[in-house]
Amino acid sequence: LAACSSGGSAAAPAKIGPSSPLVGRAEAARRKAGAPVRQVELTAQAGELDLGHVQVKTWSFGQLPGQEIRLKRGEVLRAKVTNRLPQPTTIHWHGLALRNDMDGVPDLTQPAIPAGKDFTYEFAAPEAGTFWFHPHVGTQLDRGLYGPLVIEDPADGRDYDTELVVVLDDWIDGTGTDPDAVLANLKQNGMVMGGGQSSSMPDMPGMGSGSATPPMSGMGGMPQSAALGGDAGDVTYPYFLANGARSVAPTSLRAKPGQRIRLRLINAAADTAFRVGVPGVPMRITHTDGFPATAPGNAAAVLLGMGERVDALITVPSSGVPILALAEGKGGYAQVLVHAGGSTASAANDAAAEQLKTAKVLTTADFSAAQQVALKDKTPDVTHDLKLTGPGAKYDWTINGKPYNPNDGLPVRQGQRVRLRFVNDSDMYHPMHLHGHTFQVRTPKAAGPRKDTVLVLPRRTVEVDFDADNPGQWLTHCHNIYHGEAGMMTVVSYV
Ligand code: C2O
Ligand code: CU
């Protein structure tokens, strides 16, 4: 089964838990004396939201997405979280290599915040980038409890005029179906509910079939088939949201023609991967999961798995443009408009969405880490295999055949170079996320991208390397919330 070179099934070594002095020491090394403290308050609450001509009763941080948190690298975030939900909750700061006791995983790094109580998170922001936050309890995230977290780099050259944060989501419906009911239904039927159409789409045009791929410089070669195979998600969603609104987000940006916009794209969906593109306008990828990255040429579209982020630069054309996000294998889409000068951008239509489907799409394998964030070449000290299987008879998703057990895990030691080998033994997408670290994905390129979440496509294997430099107990799991909740989680355990 798991090839674990630290081997041995003898007495389990003592774990370095969230309250270990090593955790405080790692934080002290990150936290500069006199670092400014940024205070924010978040209230998780039930309420009504307007998704754009659809009223929903749900849970959120008061708006959708939750209020953006923005700070500078090195600053300290102090976030008071008040729980007005009828059940316990936590906040996880997705993508940050923060102190283990602030990571927000119930029972592993902290007791969940009881209903009616509050808890204050405090940690130094270690790296600049595009991140986000959400509870780490059950399917709460899929009700609308999420928000963007942007950490600016004071040393950033800023080769753009303005930025636009785009948070993507899938939404079950407005009639009161909640994610817990969806999960219960999946478990009861042991499988996919009501569809989850295959993305090995029958309408997929073949290579060079005359599909209207926008002309792009620096791309070269034939337009590649855009089929990725397998199923992206299990749940059929009627709505897809960009910045909290279905179809066209009213939170449009007004820019000037020729201006450069930094897009910060965040996929907060529970069960949907998005193919994001800007019709007729090439995107230049600059960051993957917050870390500087490069990609060959200009991209027509980029694939964004659940939990993943990409930053890209675009130049505003005189007519304005939609930022279009197509739900992979599901057919719907959402968009945010960028208006230009006096002219109002027109929304993309089905034809544009169809074009995006067949455009060359960049995936993780196309990205490279920028030189300054590439890991030093090193042979791993330990390799852990994670075989991703499911769904079982009761919609069980497992890692190495086992459901989640917070007391079990993959041992690592501080200072080790660790390799995780995600082996997707199923027909579905698994966006695998590691807490507390940013790994480097091994790709055919010299240096694969730095990421904290990597989409492992059906029947594929993806290897990632990281340096064990942040002591504690760290979850690694599928960011399809339904897979994670159904068991596809384990712990990278410092011992
Ligand atoms: Cu964004 Cu463990 O999650
Ligand atoms: Cu999964």
Image (tube, rainbow, N blue to C red):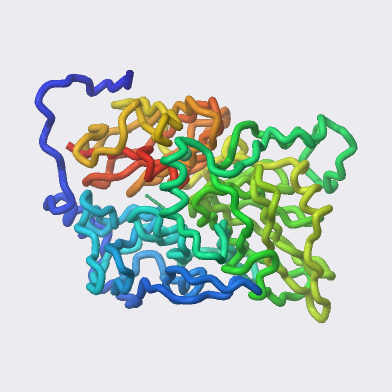
**Left or right of residue 122, residue 204 in this image:** right
Residue at x-position 61% and y-position 40%:
363
Q: Position of residue 270 (x, y in %)?
A: 49, 52
**Left or right of residue 85, residue 345 in this image:** right
Instruction: Please tell me in which quadrant of the rendered image residue 386 appears.
Output: top left
107 is higher (above) or lower (below) than 395: below
Residue at x-position 43% and y-position 65%:
145
Instruction: Please tell me in which quadrant of the rendered image residue 256 appears.
Output: bottom right
185 is higher (above) or lower (below) than 264: above
Q: Position of residue 322 (x, y in %)?
A: 74, 64
Q: Position of residue 95 (x, y in %)?
A: 41, 53
**Left or right of residue 186, residue 122 in this image:** left
Does any portion of residue 374 appear in the rendered image? no
Residue at x-position 68% and y-position 66%:
336
Q: 484 or 378, which is in the foreground?
A: 484
Q: 426 or 424, which is in the foreground?
A: 426
**Name of the residue lying farthest toward the bottom:** 342
Residue at x-position 28% and y-position 45%:
474
Q: 67 or 349, which is in the foreground?
A: 349
201 is higher (above) or lower (below) than 119: above
Does any portion of residue 177 appear in the rendered image? yes
**Name of the residue lying farthest toward the front:** 188
